[in-house]
Image (cartoon, rainbow, N blue to C red):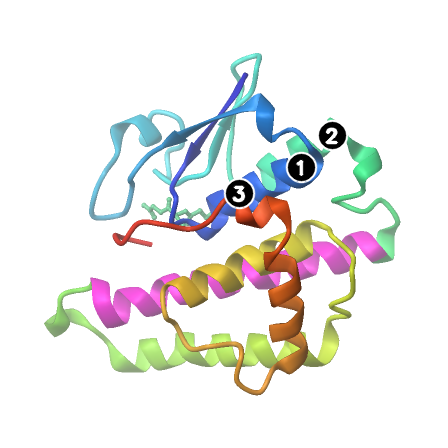
Amino acid sequence: MMRLLYQTHSPFARKALVFAHELGVADQLEVIHCETSPTNRNDDVFALNPLGKVPVLITEDGTTLFDSGVICAYLDEQHPEAELIPTEPSKKYASLCLEALADGLSEAGIWARWESVRRPEHLRHPAFLDGQVMKLAEGYNYIEENVPLDDQVTIGEIALATTLSWLEFRELPSFRTGHPRLADWFENFSERASMTATILSGDTHD
Ligand SMILES: N[C@@H](CCC(=O)N[C@@H](CS)C(=O)NCC(=O)O)C(=O)O
């Protein structure tokens, strides 16, 4: 068995696990739950990833892999025919760009939470929070106007769905208002077995 260090409220960890479900290899993963944050050091995670972050994958031969994109790339090699990371260059880079955008939206959301609920109130910086919320708004608009949002399932769509789900879970500024294509697409994608098997939970940290 491979082992996946995981948090039930991490968009990045869920991205890797949804990818494994879509690839049909989730049953080869032992999911190990860990709590970790910059203010809550987890020695087990640091022993494997010097950044102290999840997800981390330990492969069957004992190799340690992070971060979520690298884990997806490794899993993809087991079933490249699934085309979750497309091989044709224009599709591949469109998919990887969507993944990068989705990851960036998760990061903006994480920073927004630090500036609104996590950091002690007297240390918060409202202009920094505004900057992160602006990235969310720009990202939603960009996707609504530029991303095909069709039936394709690649690493880009997986990252987008797990990000949107987390942003909603954390009650960050909604993508639904003014983005009907994105909202419809998300509703449909959320019904996939990979998503319903990996529902977010937990009320601490990220
Ligand atoms: N770029 C990383 C980001 C991973 C990440 O930020 N994980 C968060 C949970 S959502 C974490 O473990 N945070 C703990 C920390 O920052 O110390 C990836 O794609 O895996």
Magenta span? 91-118
Q: Element under label 2?
A: loop
Marks 1,3: beta carbons within 8 A: no
Q: Quadrant for residue 116, please give it.
A: bottom left
154 and 107: which one is in front? Answer: 154
Q: Amino acid at mark 1?
A: Ala
Judge the density around disc 2: few (<14), some (14-19), many (≥20) Cα neighbours within 10 Å: few
Q: Element under label 3?
A: loop
Left or right, residue 157 beside residue 10: right
Tell me what residue is drawn at x 24 percent, y 76 percent. Answer: 125
Q: Any atom of ligand 1 within 8 Å of the CB at mark 1?
A: no
* Quadrant the C terminus occupies: bottom left
Left or right, residue 104 beside residue 79: left
Tell me what residue is drawn at x 25 percent, y 52 percent. Answer: 204
Q: Amino acid at mark 2?
A: Glu
Q: Is residue 42 above or below residue 88?
A: above
Left or right, residue 186 beside residue 93: left
Per the image, the residue denoted by label 3 is 197
Q: Position of residue 97 (x, y in %)?
A: 68, 60
* Quadrant the N terminus occupies: top right
Q: Is residue 124 magenta?
A: no
Judged by depth in the image, the label closer to the viewer, 2 or 3, is 3
Q: Which mark is residue 73?
A: 1
Distance CA(mark 1)–CA(mark 3): 21 Å
Q: Is residue 16 above or below residue 103?
A: above
Per the image, the residue denoted by label 2 is 77
